[in-house]
Amino acid sequence: MDLGRGAASAIVVVAAALALTACATGEAAVTLPPEGAGPDYQLGESYPPPEGVGIVVRDRTSPPPEDVYSICYINAFQTQPGELQDWPDELILAGEDGEPVFDPEWPDEALLDTSTDDRREAIVEIVAPWIQQCAGAGFDAVEFDNLDSYARSDGALTLDGNIELAEELVETAHEAGLAAAQKNAAEDAEVLHDEAEFDFAIVEECVAFDECDAYEEVYDDRVIAIEYSDAADSSFQDACREGGMPESAVLRDRDLGAPGDPGYVFELCPDD
């Protein structure tokens, strides 16, 4: 069929546009988050996305919202609060005293032991079904938290070990049709993108810690930023106006409450 030069050109333009938002990886095509869309971070109670929101992150135990790009949160390198007993003892990093090593900032989260091939494979066997459940529920992407757990292990874990686990998790996500987000770890962004093949980044307090450029240099406009209202010496709206904030950014209360809760905070950057 001869479509004509104009029609053929239009098809090329449409195909190029689709290529910007979807990439073929493994056995499935994954859809990347819409550039510049307003995000919300709902790891506590789920609620209808506020006006202006086009991206929502929710815990893997919550359903995805409708009509927005939805990201499934998985704590893949540490245990979730209250779930330590659900993990085999041999997969929990132990200190010199034989007791579990906990995250100093989140003392109810124990570090998973990513130090050997066998232990990494065992972690994947537990986490992979969660990833598949996220896909089956209708999420578009998955966020793997605590990639930098090695930095809290007193040298027992390494970046290389965490990258090897991340490679397996990202591959599993891609095979399930989910895009995969790097979570934090600004200093490792380039190697995580290049070796583990993360598709985009979800970052906390990149303005407060002056790390936004480190992510944007690797992921360009595919950076979703969460700032917190209790951060000292920071102004969310000033950063938005001055261009120091990624295009997809939200200000939240650190407890990630729901509307009506005491202390609930939700702000997006103003439209230009």
Image: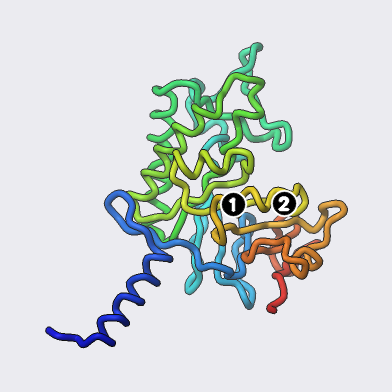
For the residue labelled by badge 1, is the local secondary structure a helix, a strand or a loop? helix
Colour pattern: rainbow
All told, the count of numbered labels is 2
Cα separation between marks 2 and 1: 17 Å
Q: Residue at x 44, y 38 (%)?
A: 195
Q: In the rendered view, tell whether residue 221 sits above or below residue 68.
A: above
On-image quarter of the C terminus: bottom right
Q: Which residue is mark 1?
A: 217
Q: Which mark is residue 80?
A: none
Work out which residue is located at the far front of the displayed protein and give it. 5
Among numbered discs 2 and 1, the one appearing first in the sequence: 2
Q: Residue at x 60, y 35 (%)?
A: 148
Q: In the rendered view, tell whether residue 203 sits above or below residue 164.
A: below
Mark 2, other Cα within 10 Å: few <14 / some 14–19 / many ≥20: some
In the image shown, does 161 or 242 lie closer to the viewer? 242
Q: Quadrant of residue 262?
A: bottom right
Q: Which residue is mark 2?
A: 205
User: Residue 141 placed where, x, y %?
Assistant: 46, 56
User: Residue 192 placed where, x, y %?
Assistant: 51, 40
Q: Residue at x 83, y 61 (%)?
A: 235
For the residue marked with disc 2, what is the amino acid?
Glu
Work out which residue is located at the far right of the displayed protein and give it. 233
For the residue labelled by badge 2, is the local secondary structure a helix, a strand or a loop? loop
On-image quarter of the N terminus: bottom left
Q: Residue at x 57, y 35 (%)?
A: 78
Q: In the image, is 238 to the left or to the right of 35?
A: right
